[in-house]
Structure formats: C-alpha cells, structure tokens
Amino acid sequence: MTIPHPVPSLSSHPLHWRERESFVLLDSEFGDGEHFFATWQAWRDDPQRPRQLHYLALLPQLAALDELQQVSAKAPEWQSLHAELRAAWPPAVPGFHRIFLQDEQLILTLMIGDSAACLRQIVAKVDAFRLHGRSWQTWPAPALNILGRLAAEHASLDISGTEETARKQLQQAGFVFESAADDASQTSALRAHFAPRFSARLTASSTAATVHSDRRAIVIGAGLAGSAACQRLVQRGWSVDLIESHTTPAQQASGNTAGIFMPLLSRDDNPGSRLSRSAYLFALQVWRQLGGIGNTFDGAACGVLQIARDAEHAGGQQQLADYWRYPADYAQWLDQAAASRLAGSPVSGGGWYFPAAGWVRPGSLCQTMLESCGDRLQIHFGQRAAILEREQDSWAVHDQHGAKIASAPVLILANACDALHFPQAADLPLSAIRGQITYLDAKQVPAITPVLCGEAYLTPAYEGICSVGASYDEDEQATLRQDSQDANLARLANILPGWRAGQLPLAGRVGFRCVASDRLPLIGALPDKNGTCAVREAKLKDLPRFAGLYSLLGYASRGLIWAPLAAELLASQLNGEPLPIEADLAAALDPARFLLKQRRRGSTPQR
C-alpha cells in the first residue's frame, strides 16, 4: 500500500516499535486524522508490530465526521478503519476520550481542549513524539520541557518547522537532534532521540501504583465495581480470583432492578462534572464492546430527561445551556412544552435531555462482564473474605475460619463499606447511605418514553414494573419502610403534575450506597497511615502505601458509570499504561487524598 503522506517516525524508522509489548505515540495535532489513519495502517501491516499501540492525540476541537470521511477516501485500505472509528467517535465535549479499536489492541486517546493545557495533564511514558502542524508552535516555551518528563527511555521525536528557540528548549529537556540543527530551516523535518544528561529524574508519569509483571490479582466484591475490575484486567491478560460472600453477583447496592446512567452538568465544569462526563462516555463505549445495552445485558438507551426543580432552577439551567452550547448528541435543554412532548406525559418544567443515556439492570451487566472473562477468572462465591495477610510479595485472603481462599501479588477491595472491616482500610472516610426504591406496576404510572428524573426518578417498564427512587436515609434499616415509599412517590408527583399515587402496596428494595466524605470514589493504591514519608512537604505520590493493595470504593449512586472508568484507571496504573483521564482528575480520586490533607494540617502523627 502507498500511504498518501508518509509518517516519518514510523515509515523511516520501523524498528522502533517492533516486537514491543506496548508502544505509546503522542501526536501534537490530530487534525483531520490523516496521520492517525497512516499510523494505524502501518501498524496493521507490520508483522512485528507491538501487541498494543497507544495513540495519544491533542486537538483543540474535535474533527467532524465528514472530515474523517474525506481523509479516509484517500486510500481504499482506510475505509474499514474509518467505519470502525466512526462507530466509536465521541461527542464534541472537552476532556480525554479513550477509544478502543482493533479488539482493544489499538487505543486512541483524544485530548480535546487547549493543547498546552492538555499536555500538562497527560500521565504516560511516551515512546515516540510527533510534533507537526501549527498548534504546537503556539505552546509556551515551558510546555516543551514537559516532553522530557513524559519521555520513555530512548524515546524518539519527529518535529517540523522548528525555530532555534524551540530546538534549544527541547535540547534542555533531554532530546538530542540527529541532524545539524544549525543547518535546518524552519520547514525541515528533524528527528531527535531522548538522551538526558541525568538519568535520575521525576517524571510526569509517576503514580502511586506499582507496575506489576506478575499479572495475578484478587478482587473482593462481585458488584459493579468488582465485576468491571475483573473485565478490564482479564482483557489485559491478567488472571483474577474473585471473592464474593453471596452465591451470585450483584446482591448489594448493585442488585436493583434498574439503575439510570447520565452525566452531571455544571456552569463551572467542576471536577465532579468533568469526571462524570468521562465516566459516562467511557461506560457507553465499554458497553458497546460488550455487545450493547438491551442485547447482552438488560436495559435501554432510551434517553434521560432531567426535570428542573422549579422556575428559578430552570432559569439557571437555561443560562448554562446558552453558555456551554453542548452538542445535541450529548445534552439538550428543552422547555416545558418540548419536555412534555418527549416524555409522553405532562411534566412540571423544562429539563435536560441526554439522548444516549438510559437505564440498565446492574445484575445482568455484572453477569455479562464476568462471563466475558472466560477461564482467566476464578470465582469464589459464598466465601467471605475476613482476613488479609501480606506474605512476602503477595496478599493472602482468608475466610472467618482462617482457611486461605486465594493469594496473589495484587489485591483490590471492591466491596463497598464492607472494606472498612479490614484494618488496612478501616480509616477510609466512607459511610453507608440507605436508599429505598419503590416498585410500581407499569399501569399505575404514565407510559413514559425516556427515563424521568429530578428530585426523584421513574424508569420505563421492565417486565411490567417501573422503578421510582430513591430515598437518601441516614439509618441502617434494611427492610422496606412506608415513609420512604411515601417520600419517593411525593417527589415523583412533583415531576408529574396531575398524577397521584393513591394507596399502593409497599413494594421495592433497600440498598446501601457507599459514599466518601467528598462524594468522589476512592480509586488506586491504599495509603498506609503508619508508614514513613521521606519528603517533608509530601505530594500524593510521596505518601506511603500498602504494597499491592488497591481500592475501587465509594461509587455512591453512580456505580453504573463509575465502574468501567474506575476499573480502566486502576488497570492502566497497574500496567504502566497512559491514564484515560487527566492527571488532576486522577489525583482527585486517589484514596490517599484524605491522608494528605490530614498530614498537611498536622493532625496525623508520622513515625
């Protein structure tokens, strides 16, 4: 095949990636995707290609699909590539977007937003840099130093249009140019390799997680968190032992008949909103990889209509819509009349419509994720993990009688607030919040099309039953309660004017959400509060951790969308891969963030 515009870093130096397990390439400008398609094709054509290729691409704005179509028409071999990419193309919203291609052997991470700002948020060890186009030339000079902190050993760099100042900055960052820089014009393509004068350096890719060559893990908990962890690890070739005290998966908070999935919006696009957007979009992609909602697991991408609380709230949301102008395939603001038409029943106000959102039966999703693991997953149902012991370089999990259930170098706690029973996790700021869901016969409520939500939610019928919820109670009663049901129905009546519940039988389910004090999950290596820290003014990466012990906890009421992204984030850390989200967002989820705050306040003694 003849590639329309050869890619210097690959076509001229094909051995750089050959016979590698994994290879990471950073492209300064995705543009219309031509360089990406060329790289993809070159990788497919090379029999000695790396098993996994990570392609990180910066772009201020997402390319339109018709632009990709025009580029793919340049080569017949690109047509099938374009079709696969098109099916996974994300909405044009800011942030990092991880896209799986070629059975997850090719992983494209699109980083939408200011390129220099995105560059500072990358956590990766990059094997090849490709700086081309114009966007990188607008970066502030210090941004080029970041390339040195991202560079893996012997990394290559291909660059065009370099001025002397930029070349000197790159040389200071540790890159050595292979041609005479003084003879190069601004339009010449130059190649450099990473050869820093000092090998000991702090890198932007430092994380608290240890990269494990022995890919065996134990996961405790077979709800959404644990099932997703098994799926993401097995996909990478890990062998996993799953320990669950119940005889089937998804028996705690993940056992509801229907859970809704949608993103969270905010005017300031705060970390919570950014994280929910990433989690929501990533979940949609993982579910497509698993076969799709309503196909391999129960649910429907029927859309979610989030109704404003009152007129004042609606006015604020209208201003938010005017400010952000979200793409229609992500979120649309509808006035009351349009919202009522969409719902198929009168609603109390305007609302946000998320067309790709909907509902899923969590238990069926857990089952699908576990079944996808095949024989690399060993499940220990009906066994309660009671004791955790560190044995040399592994963790051993014992039951309440002291019998060993499993051992492995990596142990992941994905059992919600039950994790607090272990001494290693006892101080985590987690609490159980009671949630009661009401089940109604579908004939007792209006026949809605999308999920309705606001102060309450109502799902379309599943096997003749609609779910209404959910209460937010600070008590430990595990049985159904009339006052919680009455409150659920009263909140629903506020969304559906003219509808009254009447006398209905007490029916539903009680579950307990695991919630952290700051309402964000705890994802990553668990801190050891009694461990020593050699740095006086420590950062997250400096804090002591329990070797090989990790958590996937605190998903609150958003476990459906949190589970895939959290598992991907942890699996990426354990494998030394580029992270799927920005560095500051990963830090916001680090379980050691609470210990860091305590030590900075001087409230936690150090040895």
Image: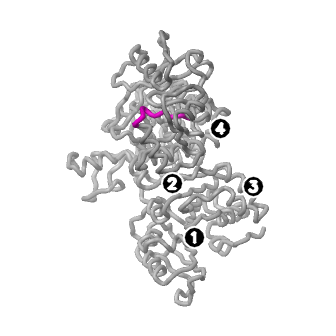
As helix, strand or loop, the secondary structure at mark 3 comes to: helix
Q: CA distance from mark 1 to mark 4?
A: 35 Å
Residue nearest the observer in this picture, 592 or 163: 163
Query: To which residue does mark 4 refer?
Result: 292
The label shown at residue 130 is: 1
Marks 1,4: beta carbons within 8 A: no
Residue 311 colored magenta? yes
Mark in front: 2 vs 3: 2
Residue nearest the observer in this picture, 210 or 131: 131
Label count reads 4
Please provide the residue range marked out in magenta.
Answer: 304-312
Instruction: Work out which quarter of the rendered image holds the N terminus and state it.
Output: bottom right
Q: Which residue is painted at 32% across and 52% down in the image? A: 543
Query: To which residue does mark 2 refer?
Result: 94
Q: Which residue is painted at 74% across and 60% down in the image? A: 78
Query: To which residue does mark 3 refer?
Result: 80
As helix, strand or loop, the secondary structure at mark 2 comes to: loop
Q: Is residue 140 above or below residue 296?
A: below
Q: Earlier in the sequence, mark 1 or mark 4?
A: 1
Q: Farthest bottom residue?
A: 183
